[in-house]
Structure formats: C-alpha cells, structure tokens
Image (cartoon, rainbow, N blue to C red):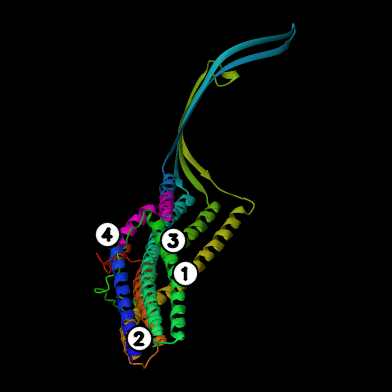
Amino acid sequence: MQQWQDGQGAVAHGWARMRGARICTVLAACMVLAPAWALDLRQAYEAAEKNDANIRASRAAAEAVRERLPQAQAQRLPNVSFSAGANRNHLKSSAQTALGPRSATSSYDSSNQALQLRQPIYRPYIGALVEQARAQVKDADASLERDEQALVVRLSEAYFDALLARVHHDLIAAQSAAYAAQLDAAHKRFKAGAAVLTDIDEAQARVDMSSAQELEAMQNLEFTRRRLQVLVGQPIDALADLDVAGFKPVPPEPARLEDWMALAEEVSPQLRSLRAQLETSQMEIEKAKAGHKPTLDAVAGWSRQDSDSVTSVNNVYNQKFVGLQLTVPLYAGGYVSSTVRQAVADSERAREALEAARLDLGTKVHEQYRAMTEGVLRIAALEQAVRSAEQALQSSRKSFLAGVRTSVDVLNAEQQRTMAMRDLAQARYMYLLSRIRLQALAGQDRWASVDQANASLMR
C-alpha cells in the first residue's frame, strides 16, 4: 500500500512537472512575442513590394511595353528630315587634242541642303499597329497586376508557413517536456515498486521520438523564417501571430460559387492578359493584310544645291515641291500571304490558350471556394476535437491514478491532444490562405485582401 501511494505521489509530481513544463513553454512563447514591434502581414507585404526582384522586373517590363503606344502613334504624325553636306572637290581632267594630250586641274567647293516633310494619309499598317500597341499595354498592365496578386499569395504562404512552423515547434517542445516528465515519473514509480519496466521503455521511446521531431520542427522553423526574410528583404525578429480569441471564420462573400466564377471571368488579371494577347494577335493579322494595300503620303520639300557636280560649278539650284505619293504593292513572291496565314495561326493559338485558362481558372476558383467554406466547418470541428482531446487527457490521467488505464494510454492521449492542436492551427492558417487565394483569382483589390487577413492578427 505504501508503495502504491509512493507511486501515485510520483505520478502527481510528474504531472506537476508537466504542467510546469507547459507553463515554461508558454512563457517562452510569450518571450518570443515580447518585442514591442512584431512584423504583421501588411508590413511584410509593403516590404516585399519594394524588395521582390520579380515585381521590380514586372514593373520595368510594363513600363517598356507602355512605350510601344506612343511609338506607334508617332508614325501617324508628320516626319520632318533635314540633310546637309559640304565638300571640297579637286578635279583633274585630261583630253586628247590636235596638239596632243592636255590636262587641267581645278578645285572648287560644293554644298547641298534638303528639307523634307512626309505626312501619312492612308496607311492601314499604322492603324493596326496603334491598336495592337493598345492591346499590348493592356496585356502589360494585366500581367503586372497578376504578378502583384501572385506576390500577395507567395508572401501570405511564407508568412503563415512561418507562423505554423513556430506553433508546431512549440507544441512539440511542450509534448517533449510532458514525455520527459512522464519518464521521470515512471522511473520513480518503478523504484517505488508501483510500475513495470515497460512503462519506462514506452516513455523513453516517446522522449526519443519527440526529440527527433523537435529537431525537425526547429529546422522547418528556420527554413520558413528564412524564406520569409528573403521576400521582405530585412531581418525578422518576431511575427504578429493569429488573434485566436477574436478569430471568427466566416463563409465567402458573395456566398454563391457562381458569383465568384462570374467575377473571376470578368476581372481576373490572368484572363484580361490573355484577352489582350488575343486582341494583339488579331491586330497582327490586320498588319499582315496591310501588305496587300496601297499607301498614300503627302510630301513637301525644299532643296538647295551649290556646285553640286562638275558640270554645275558656280551654279546654285533651289527647288521646292509639294505633292502626293502613292505606293501600290503588286507582287512580293507570296511573302504577304504567308505572313497572313502565320498571324491567323497565332491568333487561333491565343484563342485556345484563353479558353484553356478560363476552364483552369474555374477549377481553381472552385477549389479555393470549397477550401474556404469547408474550412469554416473544419475549424469548428477541430476546436471541438481539441476540447475533447483535452478532456480525454484529463480522464486518462484520472483513470491511470485509479489503476484503470496504463501510462501508454496517458502518453497516447497527450499525443492526440498535440495533434489536434496542430491540426487546428493549420486549419486556421489554411482558411486565411484560401481566402487570399480566392480573392486573388477573382482579381479583387490586393491591399484590401491583405488588410482583411491582417485584421485577424494580434496588434
């Protein structure tokens, strides 16, 4: 009887140590959050927008493409050119005369100036070129917005992965402390004759496994922190964690999947980019067809020639002219017809790419919509699972003290609670990620998406 009481005292002492270990873990987590400033999601996105090389490259590419429109429009405006030349000429001439060959040398200056103005009147190629440039600018703007939305998703994934890695590490650390306390209690109960060697072996196995898991969790924590640090371009001391008390997941708004589908097809940056590419390819057809059409320009000019040739030494000629210039293509060996066929094939490719992207977008919207709606239910179910796991752990401890359960049952209950808490944290972060992804697919305002997710974090 005395040995049983000693064993029970050892168990109670072990559980007291486990509670102390958990308190230490919580305090350590609080120390991690202790700094007055913790990087939240909006601050991370602001930093990533300035630091991310992909976004800077996309912005530069968009700026380059935007210049195509003024370049195309410039071809509709008058083209004015001026040329001038001045030469010092040395002339040596020889001739056969009745008195024999005679030669003469002379030197003289010559110059010429010309001013010409050309105004396109009818050039179908230029009209198609301008419309194509407008489509290319729309494509560049949509592509930039798509990349900016992609940055929101990439950053959010990195941010929430880092948070989840920290939660996982803290849970594994708390579980390791609990297993260590259970092992210590098993040793004391064994010495008191209230336990068998199997209890020690089982607890030792759990301690060894949790030690390996803790090392893996630490490695993952460092990796996810490093990935986020590369995106924001600055050292990270602490991250703003999820405000669990104030976190209330809600279904998507609008509530119907069809509304999200329609919204995505209308304003999705990816589809807008592909539509612009289709329009660009159609204008390429018009440009190719312009090779069969005549062109008409108005031309005007002035030229001055002074001693421009050997026969006009010391003579000055001034010429002015105004007129129309018509150019009619007759035959180009089939080149124009070939370019038309090529442009038609490219246009068909762009059309099919747009249709494929539209169908793929519908699948992705459906996936993220379901992930968000089912995430609400999953979070509620896992919150209940955590409460049940906590209750099961308490019941296992009491049953163990009463001699109804074994130490393995307590260890299993401890592990089950840790897994439930990990799954709950993962479900909460996945819900936030699914909402951000869904809003990005639908082309909604990215800053509003970031702020909405950021509101769920502790300030």
Q: Secondary structure at mark 1?
A: helix
Q: Which residues are magenta?
A: 40-65
Residue 274 x/y as whole percent? 45, 63
Mark 1 lies on residue: 357
What residue sits right under mark 2 in the picture?
Answer: 7
Q: Pick the quarter of the image with the N terminus.
A: bottom left
How crowded is the residue under tag 4: few (<14 C-alpha within 10 Å), some, or many (20+)?
few
Q: How far across and how far down the image is residue 360, in percent?
A: 46, 72
Asked whether 56 falls inside the magenta stretch, the response is yes
Which badge, 2 or 1, is on the more N-terminal residue?
Answer: 2
Q: Nearer the viewer, residue 56 or 103?
A: 56
Q: Nearer the viewer, mark 4 or mark 2?
A: 2
Crowdedness of circle 1 by 10 Å Cα count: few (<14), some, many (20+)? some
Measured in 3D between alpha carbons, the distance from the residue under mark 4 to the one under mark 2, in whole angstroms, is: 43 Å
**3D distance between C-alphas at marks 2 and 1:** 67 Å
Q: Across the whole image, how many numbered discs are drawn on residues?
A: 4
Q: Amino acid at mark 3?
A: Ala
Measure the C-alpha gap from mark 1 to mark 4: 46 Å
Name the residue tied to disc 4.
35
Mark 4 in CB contact with mark 2 (< 8 angstroms): no
For badge 2, the amino acid type reads Gly
Residue beneath label 3, please?
Answer: 276
